[in-house]
Image (cartoon, helix red, strand yellow):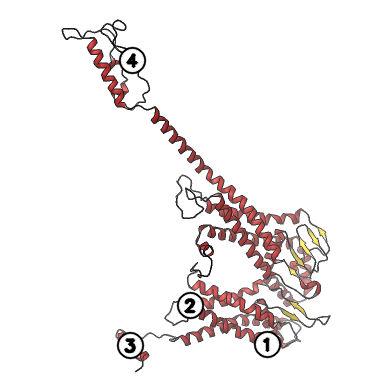
Amino acid sequence: MTNQTVQAARATAEEPAGEAPAVVYGGSAGAATAVCLVRGVIAAGLGLGALAVLATLAWISSPYLDSGPGGALRVAAALWLLAHGTELVRMDTLSGLPAPMGLVPLLLSVLPVWLVYRTSRDALDPGDGRVRPSTGGVVMTVTAGYLAVAAVAVAYARGGAGPAADPLSAALHVPCLVVAAALAGAWTAHGRPVGPVPAWVPEWARRAPARSRSLAAARAAGGALVVLLGGGVLVAAVAVAWHAGEARASLLGLSGDWAGRAAVLALVVALLPNAAVWGAAYGLGPGFLLGTGAAVTPLGVSGAAAVPDFPLLAAVPEGAGRGGWTTWAAGVVPVAAGLVAGWRVAGAAAPPRPGSRLRSGSGDPHARRGGAWTARGTAGAALSAGLLTGAAVAALSAAAEGPLGANRLAAFGPLWWQTGLAAAVWVAVLGLAAGLGVRGWRMRGEAAAAAERASGWRARLRGLREWRPRTVTRFRGWRARGRGGAAGAVPGGEPVDSGTPGPEALRPEAEEAGAPQEYGALPAVWEEDVSGSGRGGDAGPAVS
């Protein structure tokens, strides 16, 4: 008997009587690898099939059926590859020259990314008893299955007269997108851990994710990015609504039947994330390009813009011109993003806790007494938030731009490096000012409390210097009483009432009751000699 047979027999003998043995699918590593490979194929097929259904419906409802169902399926394959960032090439142009199409509708990319993400995450989900390969094995096998379908789609899309996929662009973009989504799914399956970071990473970089300042900078950058994208959507919506007549005329002019208009509206919806990025770039200042050498910014339109007939671009003026207050108002978007970043940094640097003492010893190297960061730590977090926001905006701008043809149509969308740099500067400068200002405002109570504590300790020290112990005062009183009794006695032993009150009558009642007093010099009457016949005469030595 082999070792596996012996282990199976032992497992069967250990099972309680009356219970059926559990069925485990994929009982070996090879079977688990094959399952992951099939899952990658299924993920790619689902995304491609969804677009094929939409393309077939558009072909059926169209009054022009000259392309046939094969042409509709080739269009679906080309759109599916375009969703991964692959550049398409149109050969049927008026000039006869190939025209590239690289402007990716970002909403179209959500479906393949989500499918790969879910496939990788579910393959590593320990919910059942299946044997699974390692994390690297899951990522590689899911990617391999997905890329097999992508290779078939590239070959199929190049067989017709419609737009064909560039093989070099597909080989560059599709694997990168699939691997990134698969790694994100694997990371989620493991609980989104921050570490451990590989040993070859420098020490400062390995410790950075665990520091509170780095986490606060990431949260501030996320808030600023949300404000920028939300403001971009608002800018685009206001622009289209302001020119609603032109947008409606563009929609009606692109197609004369309801099926064509529905297809145009579907394309408008798919381009809404692009419009958000373009609007954010417009508010940041660099704007976006509408053709080679034609830039649209809040200051105006420079150059001869090649404006396609499309509803989302109906608000762009056809010729060059200067902007006004309506275009300058878009600058509110980056200002709001910078203020939000500064507010979130200040919330971590000096958390508002009215009526309570802040904890000390937070473990952050930039923390002071009370758990609040120093001004240097706050400034560092604000600048880091600006850099993270700039990197994110640059990546989104690179994904939202691309060519729509050759020559003048070769550049459409924001320039990623200009937009990223503008976002970093806006958020860093305004976030720094807002973060330090809010931190100073929240620390004013702590500073006043510290000054009050210092003044209280100074008052106590001054009181200790002026305070004389009660024992010394009582001892002096006992001495004064003894001398006064000796001076007022007669040889017969009876004291003589001299009419002058003794020290007992002159002592404060508060001392009799034992209440604390603050003694300086003794009363003047205690300083004088008390005799039996009043003041003067044969006075004894004064009490010092």
- Residue linked to disc 3: 12
State the separation of the CA atoms marked 1 and 3.
51 Å
| Residue furthest out toward the left | 492
**Which residue corresponds to mark 4?**
527
Front residue of 389/464: it is 464
For marks 2 and 1 on the same chain, the one whose residue lies earlier in the sequence:
2
Residue at the bottom extreme? 1
Q: Residues within 10 Å of mark 4 (few under 14, many from 20)?
A: some
Q: Quadrant of residue 51?
A: bottom right
Residue 480 showing in the rendered view: yes
Residue type for callout 2:
Leu
Residue type beneath disc 4: Glu
> Between residues 338 and 276, which one lies in front from this camera angle?
338
Q: Secondary structure at mark 3?
A: helix
* Residue drawn at 47 percent across, 37 percent down: 452
Give residue 155's mark.
1
CA distance separating discs 3 and 2: 27 Å
Q: Which comes sooner in the sequence, label 3 or label 4?
A: 3
Q: Are the residues flagged by discs 3 and 2 in contact, CB closer than 8 Å?
A: no
Q: Left of 13 or right of it: where is 141? A: right
| Between discs 2 and 4, the one toward the N terminus | 2
Q: Residue at x 36, y 90 (%)?
A: 3
